[in-house]
Image (cartoon, coloured by chain):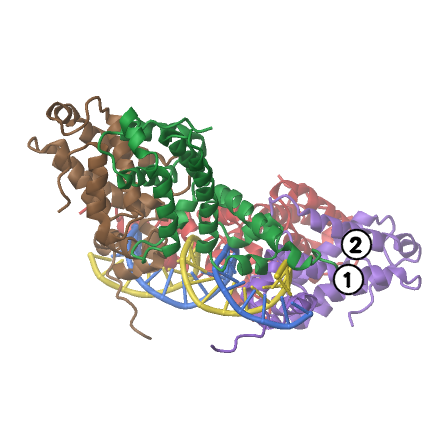
Chain colours: A red, B purple, C brown, D green, E yellow, F blue
Amino acid sequence: MSSPRANLGPAAAARNRAALLNAARTVFSELGPHAPLNAVARAAGVGQGSLYRHFPDRQTLVLAVLEEQVVTLEEAAGDPDTDLTGLLGQVTRHAIDSVVVIDIVSATPDTPPDPRLMELRGRVASALGSRLPDAVATGSAPAGTTVDDVLLAVELVATALTRRPAAERADYAARAWKLLGFRVTAGA
Amino acid sequence: MSSPRANLGPAAAARNRAALLNAARTVFSELGPHAPLNAVARAAGVGQGSLYRHFPDRQTLVLAVLEEQVVTLEEAAGDPDTDLTGLLGQVTRHAIDSVVVIDIVSATPDTPPDPRLMELRGRVASALGSRLPDAVATGSAPAGTTVDDVLLAVELVATALTRRPAAERADYAARAWKLLGFRVTAGA
Amino acid sequence: MSSPRANLGPAAAARNRAALLNAARTVFSELGPHAPLNAVARAAGVGQGSLYRHFPDRQTLVLAVLEEQVVTLEEAAGDPDTDLTGLLGQVTRHAIDSVVVIDIVSATPDTPPDPRLMELRGRVASALGSRLPDAVATGSAPAGTTVDDVLLAVELVATALTRRPAAERADYAARAWKLLGFRVTAGA
Amino acid sequence: MSSPRANLGPAAAARNRAALLNAARTVFSELGPHAPLNAVARAAGVGQGSLYRHFPDRQTLVLAVLEEQVVTLEEAAGDPDTDLTGLLGQVTRHAIDSVVVIDIVSATPDTPPDPRLMELRGRVASALGSRLPDAVATGSAPAGTTVDDVLLAVELVATALTRRPAAERADYAARAWKLLGFRVTAGA
DNA sequence: TATGAATGAGGTTTCATTCAT
DNA sequence: GATGAATGAAACCTCATTCAT
């Protein structure tokens, strides 16, 4: 009878997916990790049902957001001129912007770690690890730092950022990296 | 007509309060920071209403749990034989046990920090600060560490523990403290 | 596993809205202005959530009931053969049937008057005002009566009906209108 | 162990009762007819239990408030110089001040009218009735007014005041009395 | 007799998820 | 494949009432 949002057919699928990812970043960032999923759908200009078709649960949606960030990181790691300091800067920026994602991933302690998350973790390790020796050599990372140490450090910082008001995050991250002994590019 | 829980009268007040605090620790620890408050009441063997009388909201309840821990810390700090390493060990143990409390306190970023939390923070700072010079002198803390640095480190560790399965927490904390350059008594 | 109410899809939306309005009239009339909203949902054969989707709060629900009545009044006012006596009769009948609605609308004195209510009031004023001069001329209303007077009279009667047992309302209204000096068609 | 409010023994009984009545007027007036009863107890500086001992339910408490007002009215009626206009002014003032009481008395339509309320009604009728003939004679009340008419008018006005913001009540009452054709002393 | 904590039923509201169209 | 209304379980919280002291 009426004409709600036009049904653009399959063509809209990709567009919708992208819109949902963007909306997810925004909404989670504004409303926190417990933002109602329908807020994401609304922000994306998409029906509830489409949200669930693309991302059957909260976790999947968040992992997709993370994956985007990892891809970006891998691209940066593809440029031979980028060093650990730069990569960590990028990771920090992501953490600052989408702070909450990390809050949702593995939200339930004592839950078997999500394999998809583990995979992303591995890819981050590769990207950062490729620059670690150089970083240690130039003093951008403490002597004796292992790849696991770097990941641990990233986790400490990213998780802590989760609790800080947006306005303080950049400063806070800077202090934390300093305390940890890493040189990190200031967030853009 | 039926026999509800007996009304033990006002005499039960203190007992109830204590029971609620214990229950809160347990329940939050098991069900996570979003555990329904009625689960706490039930675990404490207390009516819904009593919970709300003693602790008008989640935040207040959690702060009371934290306060207990701070009191313990202050007692430990009263013993001249206890050094920073020992105090941090105790803090870490608390964090491991009641991991989630930190998750709830200041759960809403961008919210003006709760003054009650700030007060507790100050007391922790005093307790730890009193031992800092010694710790730096003996190499238990990195050279140049300030009280703020110690608090930052505690925050990084405690927050990160929040995300780890219970079984891994002790190990995880040990690795983190090592990375941060602090000597810390192994969790009990 | 069980068979909850069938999800009839969006097609049911209009039907649900109507069912809720009917249920609201009935339930409020029977249980009084503080009837639990879930009683309305149940009576309408509709889920809790649907009630809240259509009518986000009690006030909105009640205003919708009132609006229906105002529409009926406007229709009656559209018929040139209807005089003030007839219109007031209709208003009185509405008040008798849905007595409580007026109890809920503007339930909180000292609250800024709801603009939606003001709008309805304006529409009632138009409908009644169009017949006032004639009514004064024929002695159906006291000499010198203004539109505001008519509204005041309606308010006095409608509010008072709120307090009377259903069985007495028609008589009570008749007495009140007589005291006020208006000729009003006996309630149907 | 502690010393809460001192238990002054039976001597305090009368004092408590009075305090509760005062508190009831204030609290109902400020919080509306649904004010929690414990707010009344608190405002009276009296324990919950004492409230219930003196006034086993809301209705009883409210009737006691009304009774006080009726007594005042009867005292005024004892003075031969007071006419209907003055008595109605007093009634109006009471209605304005304690507006809500009438809201609570017989809050449930279709409930058998409370006999205590009926008795008060009778006393009001006597007080007002004694002045009616004079009032009609002097034009302070419409010709042909019966005692029942006066009571009906009082009810209309008092009930309607219930819905008005405090600031407007005096004006509103004046308009209503004028519409009803009674001369009434302006509220003090 | 006064006190005030305890109780718990019940109303309100939200939101993850389903499903007819 | 998209849409968006419907569902209802479940959390939150309030408050009338009881009762040990």
Which residue lies at the image location 16% right of the left edge and 39% below the top edge?
C89
Q: Can residue C72 be seen from the camera position used here?
A: no
Residue occupied by mark 2: B124
Q: Are marks 2 and 1 in contact (CB under 8 Å)?
A: yes
Q: Secondary structure at mark 2?
A: helix
Q: Can residue B75 be seen from the camera position used here?
A: yes
D81 relative to B136 in the view: left or right? left
Closer to the camera in the image, F5 or C134: C134
Closer to the camera in the image, C32 or D94: D94
Residue C66 appears at what percent x and percent y? 26, 43
Above or below — where is A89 with respect to A60?
above
Chain ID at mark 2:
B
Q: Nearer the viewer, mark 2 or mark 1?
A: 2
A25 relative to C14 in the view: left or right? right
Residue D64 appears at what percent x and percent y? 47, 50
Q: Do pointers 2 and 1 mark residues of a single chain? A: yes
